[in-house]
Amino acid sequence: MFHIVILKADYEGWWLFDDWQQNIVETYTFDAENEMRQEYRKLLDEMKSTYHSFRTGKYDMHAFFNGCELEYCEDCGEDIQIYYTPIMMKDDSVYTF
């Protein structure tokens, strides 16, 4: 199975920290790789128009954000930026172009 997951976190999703799966807020499932890739490109375009900014990092992943969407971090005592990262997956593994 092929999937696209949307990660919402206080870090860019390409870091893939040990518990990154706990930050998944949406999942899309596809039977074929080409369907997933097509939807991924469409999703990137939609997110570029929805969010004010994005960064591209490791594995050519995109982290989208709005500068005003901050959450308070108890541990660090300050507001931190929230990022949304779409990630392609094949079964349970990260899939890159």
Image (cartoon, rainbow, N blue to C red):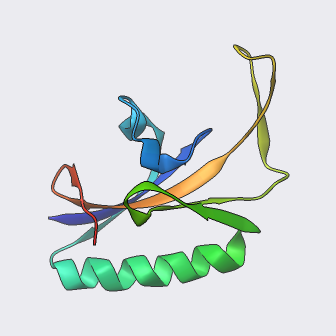
Q: In this view, does 82 lie above or below 61?
A: above
Q: Is residue 68 above or below residue 32?
A: above
Image location of residue 1, percent across then percent down: 14, 64
Q: Which of 10 and 14 is in front in this view?
A: 14
> How many numbered tags mark residues here?
0
Q: Is residue 17 above or below residue 28?
A: above
Q: In the picture, residue 22 is in which quadrant? A: top left
Image location of residue 78, percent across then percent down: 82, 24
Q: Which of 75 and 27 is in front in this view?
A: 75
Quick one: which residue is furthest to the top in this view? Answer: 75
Q: Is residue 71 left or right of residue 96?
A: right
What residue is drawn where x is 44% and y is 42%?
Answer: 15
What residue is drawn where x is 77% and y is 58%?
Answer: 66
Q: Is residue 2 left or right of residue 5?
A: left
Q: In the picture, residue 40 is in which quadrant? A: bottom left
Q: In this view, does 91 lie to the left or right of 68?
A: left
Image location of residue 20, percent across then percent down: 41, 37
Q: In the picture, residue 91 is in which quadrant? A: bottom left
Quick one: which residue is furthest to the front in this view? Answer: 58
What residue is drawn where x is 20% and y is 66%?
Answer: 2
Q: Quadrant of the C terminus?
A: bottom left
Q: Is residue 9 above or below residue 7?
A: above
What residue is drawn where x is 70% and y is 73%?
Answer: 50
Q: In this view, does 8 lie to the left or right of 27?
A: right
